Image: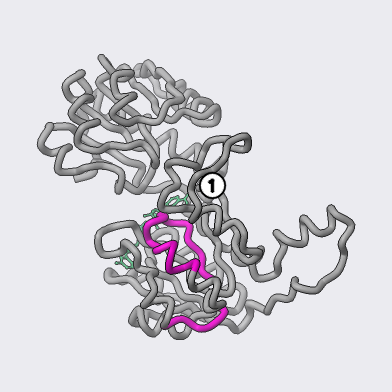
Amino acid sequence: MKVAVFSTKPYDRQFLETANDAVQDCCHQLSFFEARLDVATAPLAAGFPVVCVFVNDNLDAPTLKILAEQGTRLIALRCTGFNNVDRQAVRDLGLKVVRVTAYSPYSVAEFALGMILSLNRKIHRAYNRTREGNFALDGLLGFDLHGRTIGVIGTGKIGLIFANLMTAFGCQVLGYDPYPNPEFTKNPLCRYVPLAELFAQADVISLHCPLSPETRYIINAQAIEKMKPGVILINTSRGALIDTGAVIVGLKSQTIGALGLDVYEQEAELFFEDLSNEIIQDDTFERLLTFPNVLVTGHQAFFTEDALGDIAATTIANITNFATNQPLTNQVS
Ligand code: NAD
């Protein structure tokens, strides 16, 4: 099957080719494009029955229409979230969309934990200081995580692992999830609470829910007002879970004591590219980078060998199922 792979980086190519070579009797023809998929780049996929994309490719109705008219029948997402897909347009055009429903959830859970440790103990600042010959400790004071309360919003695959990691530090974990996970409450240090109670009690809040109309701006000015002063807020899920303007106000008033972001609402214009020679035009993003207690990474929480191997293997298996008329178990409905 001919597959047009968009938003390709060298590591995508390496892991996809390895997974493709491992498929017996059914190797796909992978064509790699560096371009991000959108209306302007969709013509590159002409004649490809399968288009393979990532988190910041734009699968809006006009792009999908071009793909369908050019003969594409399957969109294979190399990610879990599908908030970048216009599902109504997919249905109207008779396309199919498959995704990677699960890949190493440890990758993201461990990264969220790393952000907490860095921000709390100011490791990101100490790294720069010592390189400048500054060994002073002023400004680097943290607190023991042991005995603290952690709030987890979304207790699915990643949130559950994150919660269990935090209990290993001796933390209490408060979860909020409209669809409770029975595995979560098997841990005696984890319990579900209403969202307002989580906001009021937690010393650290980590977001592990998908982006949906219900969760968009789940962290807004009203939510921040309810939080403990000095709370550490971590977002490794999707940028638009957070109203960035409200969070900047919260940082200025010091209600938010530290912020770790691996995702950002407008990240499609920034992340996964080397912009070090450019003038970044996003003033909100630039303001975030001025705070000493803000750590921003460019959507790298998933970026482990294990996760990339899982993503590539599932993506190729999804395409093989389509090519051989097998049931599409990972189809986005
Ligand atoms: P999952 O589907 O296993 O779990 C999501 C959980 O969120 C579920 O338990 C669900 O019930 C819950 N949820 C749904 N609506 C909610 C709401 N309104 N409030 C609170 N919880 C709600 O997903 P997962 O594999 O754990 O992934 C979680 C998110 O992490 C993904 O949606 C994706 O956005 C993000 N992610 C980020 C990266 C990265 O590299 N930064 C990588 C993978 C996934």
In the image, residue 157 above or below residue 69 = below
How does the figure colour the protein chain or chains? one colour
Q: Indicate the position of residue 7 as horizontal and vertical percent values.
A: 43, 30
Q: Indicate the position of residue 279 as horizontal and vertical percent values.
A: 57, 40
Q: Reply yes or no: does residue 101 show up in magenta.
A: no
The residue lying at 65 percent from left, 70 percent from top is 120
In the image, taking residue 63 as reference, residue 36 lies left or right, namely right
In the image, taking residue 92 as reference, residue 316 lies left or right, namely right
The reply to whether residue 212 is in sight is yes
Asked whether 249 or 100 is in front, the reply is 249
The residue lying at 44 percent from left, 71 percent from top is 152
Magenta residues? 226-248
What is the secondary structure assignment of the residue under circle 1? loop
In the image, residue 269 above or below residue 205 = above
Image quarter of residue 239: bottom left
Q: Amino acid at mark 1?
A: Gly
Residue ID for mark 1: 298
Image quarter of residue 20: top left
Q: Indicate the position of residue 183 as horizontal and vertical percent values.
A: 39, 69
Neighbour class for label 1 at 10 Å: few (<14), some, many (≥20)?
Answer: some
In the image, residue 54 above or below residue 17 = below
Q: Indicate the position of residue 258 as horizontal and vertical percent values.
A: 58, 69
The residue lying at 84 percent from left, 58 percent from top is 130
